[in-house]
């Protein structure tokens, strides 16, 4: 069915934390369905939450509105732009599947972003990034429709206002858009980016001196599987906190006071390793009921079985407060929090 509607819908299967929550209505927009079908289904239905793979959301309570789940499918090569191939995927395509599809066609540029959970449509909203690469570096444009009135718009990179794990779509000026298709400018000439330490070490472990894009994708996937739990076995949303970016002088003062603090230049300031800050506060591996911090990666909050979203949120707040008390640095969450306020 290209479009289905469920009332009083359970959401546990639709979020990678696996927490129990309900929506007043769930509209699933799939296959080759047209955006107009989805807009008709949500018209006059109150607040609408657009959901892709559910890998970047924490339901801290029920959602008193309509969840619009996007599962549309389709991928194609459009042609060249200044000698670089442009590919397009519908918003509901699985991100990792799309990355592998591009590599199978000899198209390079997304390999460092392999195995990131979620959908293609979510990638520009979050400006996903990993292992030294951000999505915006290969972004070409996207198509979207406004939920309020069905107006169509094309967004280029400046219109998206990309930042670190950020875009215009996460703010008031860009909210309310349904991303339908996303385009990327890729390359036929391999230029592997292997400077990230974990990636470099994994390639060395495999005795690969000159990595191909496929080698990079495979190595990235191995590192991610080693460091991050499989949501099918242990509920989580990947990294829960953003790495904080501070002014250079403040970061230098912190580094003087806390030797060993990992930091690197980014976005006009200095980015700190949130995992290190959390680990120094003793949170790695701790558990409060079924809500916990993963034993292998302090950035990952997990659901050991029956934790509620509210319990995971309460744990996240305590982690934030302890980092603020010790280091004077306030952490911000990566996932969208639904049903409660972060502060």
Image: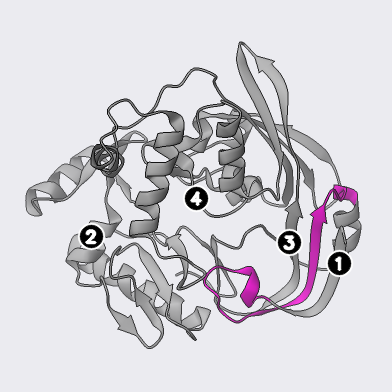
Give the crowd class for mark 3: few <14, some 14-19, many >=20 residues within 10 Å. Answer: many
Give the crowd class for mark 2: few <14, some 14-19, many >=20 residues within 10 Å. Answer: many
Task: Residue 116: give its label.
Answer: 4
For label 4, the SS is loop
Residue at image point 46% right, 65% down: 230
The foreground one among 17 and 85 is 85
Kindly indicate the quadrant of the structure image that contains residue 291: bottom left
For label 1, the SS is strand
On the picture, is 296 further left or further right than 236? left
Q: Which residues are magenta?
A: 11-36
C-alpha span from label 1 to label 2:
44 Å
Residue linked to disc 1: 4
Task: Residue 277: give its label.
Answer: 2
Colour mapping: one colour
> Can you give x and y, in whole percent of width and height, for residue 178 in the image?
74, 49
For label 3, the SS is strand
Residue 34 on the magenta segment:
yes
On the picture, is 155 further left or further right than 314? right
Give the crowd class for mark 4: few <14, some 14-19, many >=20 residues within 10 Å. Answer: many
On the picture, is 263 further left or further right than 55? left
The quadrant of the picture occupied by the N terminus is bottom right
Residue at image point 70% right, 33% down: 88
The foreground one among 158 and 1 is 1
Asked if the residues shown at circle 3 and circle 4 are in contact, with their CB atoms under 8 angstroms apart, the answer is no
For label 2, the SS is helix
Q: Residue furthest front?
A: 207
Q: Residue furthest top?
A: 82
Look at discs 3 and 2 and give the one toward the viewer.
3
C-alpha span from label 2 to label 4:
23 Å
Residue 157 on the magenta segment:
no
């Amino acid at each position: 069915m290209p479009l289905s509607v469920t009332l009083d819908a359970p959401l546990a299967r639709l979020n990678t934390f696996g927490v129990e929550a309900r929506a007043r209505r769930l509209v699933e927009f799939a296959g080759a369905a047209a955006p107009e079908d989805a807009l008709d289904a949500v018209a006059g239905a109150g607040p609408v939450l657009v959901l892709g793979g559910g890998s970047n959301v924490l339901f801290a309570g029920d959602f008193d509105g309509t969840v619009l789940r996007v599962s549309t499918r389709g991928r194609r090569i459009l042609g060249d732009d200044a000698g670089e191939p442009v590919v397009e995927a519908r918003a509901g395509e699985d991100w990792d599947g799309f990355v592998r599809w591009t590599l199978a066609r000899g198209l390079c540029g997304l390999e460092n972003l392999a195995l990131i959970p979620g959908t293609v449509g979510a990638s520009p909203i979050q400006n996903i990034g990993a292992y030294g690469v951000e999505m915006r570096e290969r972004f070409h444009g996207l198509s979207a429709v406004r939920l309020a009135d069905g107006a169509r718009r094309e967004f280029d990179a400046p219109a998206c206002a990309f930042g670190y794990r950020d875009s215009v779509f996460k703010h008031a000026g860009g909210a309310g858009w349904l991303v339908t298709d996303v385009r990327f400018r890729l390359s036929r000439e391999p230029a592997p980016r292997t400077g990230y330490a974990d990636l470099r070490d994994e390639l060395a472990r495999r005795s690969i001196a000159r990595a191909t894009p496929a080698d990079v994708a495979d190595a990235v996937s191995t590192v991610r599987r080693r460091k991050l739990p499989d949501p099918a076995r242990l509920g989580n949303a990947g990294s829960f906190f953003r790495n904080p970016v501070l002014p250079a002088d403040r970061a230098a003062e912190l580094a003087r006071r806390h030797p060993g603090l990992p930091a690197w230049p980014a976005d006009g300031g200095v980015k700190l390793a949130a995992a290190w800050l959390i680990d120094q506060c003793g949170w790695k591996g701790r558990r409060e009921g079924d809500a916990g911090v993963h034993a292998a990666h302090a950035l990952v909050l997990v659901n050991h079985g029956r934790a509620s979203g509210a319990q995971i949120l309460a744990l996240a707040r305590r982690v934030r407060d302890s980092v603020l008390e010790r280091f004077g640095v306030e952490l911000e969450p990566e996932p969208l929090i639904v049903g409660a306020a972060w502060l």
